[in-house]
């Protein structure tokens, strides 16, 4: 990896930190629990690395076995995280309240 | 598919994640936001599977099926009250996944490492590993499997510091010689141990802060993996998650008026006689009957309901909503005031009330409603204690002094539902219960509220 690539990576990292902080500070208290489980679900993006590790080798070896475990953990994280977030968000409803005259 | 096209698809996927979080800024658009974020994940996974580097799919399909079945089953079955445990477990899985990916990369590289790659791989393994075990301990504490009391022993912080130093030392050895398998596996063991040892001295009541912080760590681990694999999608998403976890950690610490260092090393909730001492409030608590409470509610024109976790523990959120709805149909202005630490994690109380069918536009955060208590007729405090304790504002000797609290005592009448005369979690007396404008209604919150509702309907 040349120095240029590292610097590009760091640039992306720092800018994404700022963008993330800005977006997240706008999430209201009401949605902090779904925010946590949603951000948790997206941290399962490590699955991309896990897929490459599992699918790359021709035969079963230590790399593909470790990758296999990583895919299991990451997909628990991704599938569970998104489904539970969706379940919570479905509960948030706005009702039109009628008042007796 | 060429690597450039895959990278462009990762850029689309990262944009979808950003849009997803942006749409979480309102309950009206949040569902769409989650769908956008899901499709971002789907697109990224599809692009990866289409990459020329992947040749075998059998193992991948089996692993995804196992993971999806476990995660999906847990997500469907979990009770809303157990959400902190669920998030802790999923988070642990995320940490483990990052660490394992780094480990497989380490195993699979034969042509030597560049120092930057090696550094990020080691960081990913260390942070991911301690996130995994730390999250498991946090889960255990939230479930009550592990003692919720801080587990401390003399020299604990010295031991933890020593382990950290040893980890750094071993990492340096791996830098000198990446083939040093002994040092490498010792690092893994130490990282796993560090997660356990760093979380056990923290009290059960502080676990939500730890879960938020570990969430942030899992994000950092993902970013580090991204650096090692030179994968921009991982770098971007990891930093988003890292920022989100830190933000929520800060909110929780602020709501308790404590520093993160105090949470991590303060062993709060350890039985300590010296902090409980001091003058308690004088006077007597005035217990009232259901009929009297119902009458006060009937004659009011505005009501603010203040729920605490005691309400959820008593399964009283549905009957609370029924009372709120009944009174709002009678013409009362009914709102809910929610303290940041009212539930077991940030925003947890809002989820529990939404589950009970409370309309989200009735839910108010403390800073949006605190000025309104002084012109409110009745405040109904259900199973909350420390978050409505005026001692936080008036008594510098109180352990919770300085914590932002709801100004419920400024309203005309405060009705407090309480199980018994016992003190709250921090072991602090609450002078609110002794005030002239406070009416105490003792008993189980669910049956008390049911009785109040019946009396109102008569």
Image (cartoon, coloured by chain):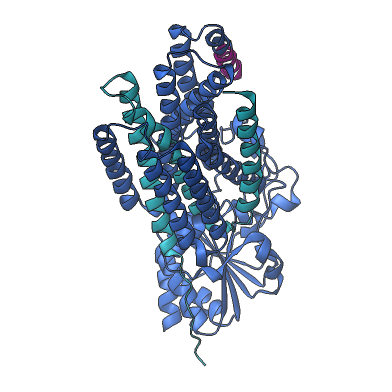
Chain colours: A cyan, B blue
Q: Position of residue B266 (x, y in %)?
A: 62, 31
Residue at left offset 48%, top offset 9%:
B183
Figure check: B435 above or below B145: below
Q: Does the magenta segment cover residue B178?
A: no
Near-viewer residue (A81 or B343): A81
Q: Position of residue B444 (x, y in %)?
A: 42, 60
Figure check: B17 above or below B448: above
Q: Main secondary structure of the magenta part?
A: helix
Query: How many marks on residues?
Result: 0
Q: Quadrant of the N terminus of chain A?
A: top right
Near-viewer residue (B315 or B209): B209
Q: Position of residue B234 (x, y in %)?
A: 51, 37
Residue at left offset 51%, top offset 60%:
B350
Asked whether residue B344 is in view, the answer is no
Q: Position of residue B366 (x, y in %)?
A: 64, 60
Residue at left offset 71%, top offset 46%:
B401
First to last magenta residue range? B155-168
């Amino acid at each position: 990896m040349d120095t240029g690539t590292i610097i590009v990576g760091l640039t992306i990292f720092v800018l994404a930190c700022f963008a993330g902080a800005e977006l997240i500070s706008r999430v209201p208290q009401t949605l902090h629990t779904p925010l946590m489980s949603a951000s948790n679900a997206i941290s399962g993006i490590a699955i991309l690395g896990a897929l490459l590790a599992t699918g790359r080798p021709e035969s079963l070896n230590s790399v593909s076995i470790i990758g296999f475990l990583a895919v299991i953990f990451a997909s628990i994280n991704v599938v569970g995280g998104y489904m539970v977030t969706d379940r919570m968000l479905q509960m948030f409803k706005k009702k039109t309240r009628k008042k007796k005259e | 598919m060429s690597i450039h096209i895959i990278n462009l698809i990762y850029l689309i996927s990262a944009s979808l994640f950003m849009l997803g979080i942006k749409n979480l800024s309102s309950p009206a658009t949040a569902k769409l936001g989650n769908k956008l974020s899901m499709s971002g994940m789907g697109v990224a996974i599809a692009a990866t599977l289409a990459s020329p580097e992947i040749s075998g799919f059998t193992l991948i399909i089996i692993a995804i099926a196992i993971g999806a079945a476990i995660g999906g089953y847990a997500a469907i079955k979990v009770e809303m009250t157990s959400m902190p445990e669920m998030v802790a477990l999923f988070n642990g899985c995320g940490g483990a996944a990052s660490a394992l990916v780094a480990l497989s990369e380490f195993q699979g590289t034969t042509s030597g490492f560049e120092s930057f790659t090696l550094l990020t791989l080691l960081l990913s393994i260390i942070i991911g590993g301690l996130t995994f075990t730390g999250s498991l301990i946090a889960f255990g504490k939230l479930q009550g499997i592990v003692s919720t009391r801080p587990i401390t022993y003399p020299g604990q912080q010295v031991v933890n510091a020593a382990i950290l130093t040893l980890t750094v030392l071993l990492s340096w050895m791996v830098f000198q010689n990446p083939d040093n398998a002994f040092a490498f596996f010792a690092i893994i063991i130490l990282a796993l141990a560090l997660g356990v040892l760093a979380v056990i001295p923290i009290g059960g009541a502080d676990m939500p802060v730890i879960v938020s912080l570990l969430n942030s760590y899992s994000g950092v681990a993902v970013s580090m993996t991204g650096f090692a694999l030179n994968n921009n999608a991982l770098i971007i998403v990891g930093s988003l998650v890292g920022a989100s976890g830190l933000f929520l950690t800060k909110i929780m610490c602020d709501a308790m008026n404590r520093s993160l260092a105090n949470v991590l090393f303060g062993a709060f909730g350890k039985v300590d006689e010296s902090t409980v001492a001091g003058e308690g409030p004088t006077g007597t608590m005035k217990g009232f009957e259901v009929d009297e409470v119902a009458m006060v509610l009937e004659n009011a024109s505005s009501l603010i309901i203040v729920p605490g976790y005691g309400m959820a523990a008593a399964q009283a959120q549905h009957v609370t909503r029924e009372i709120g709805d009944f009174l709002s149909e009678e013409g009362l202005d009914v709102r809910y005031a929610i303290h940041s630490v009212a539930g077991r994690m940030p925003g947890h109380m809002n989820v529990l009330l939404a589950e009970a069918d409370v309309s989200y536009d009735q839910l108010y955060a403390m800073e949006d409603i605190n000025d309104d208590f002084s012109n409110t007729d009745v405040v109904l405090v259900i199973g909350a204690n420390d978050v409505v304790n005026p001692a936080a504002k008036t008594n510098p000797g109180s352990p919770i002094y300085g914590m932002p609290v709801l100004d419920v005592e400024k309203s005309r009448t405060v009705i407090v539902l309480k199980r018994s005369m016992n003190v709250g979690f921090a072991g602090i007396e609450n002078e609110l219960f002794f005030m002239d404008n406070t009416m105490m209604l003792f008993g189980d919150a669910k049956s008390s509220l049911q009785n109040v509702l019946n009396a109102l309907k008569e």
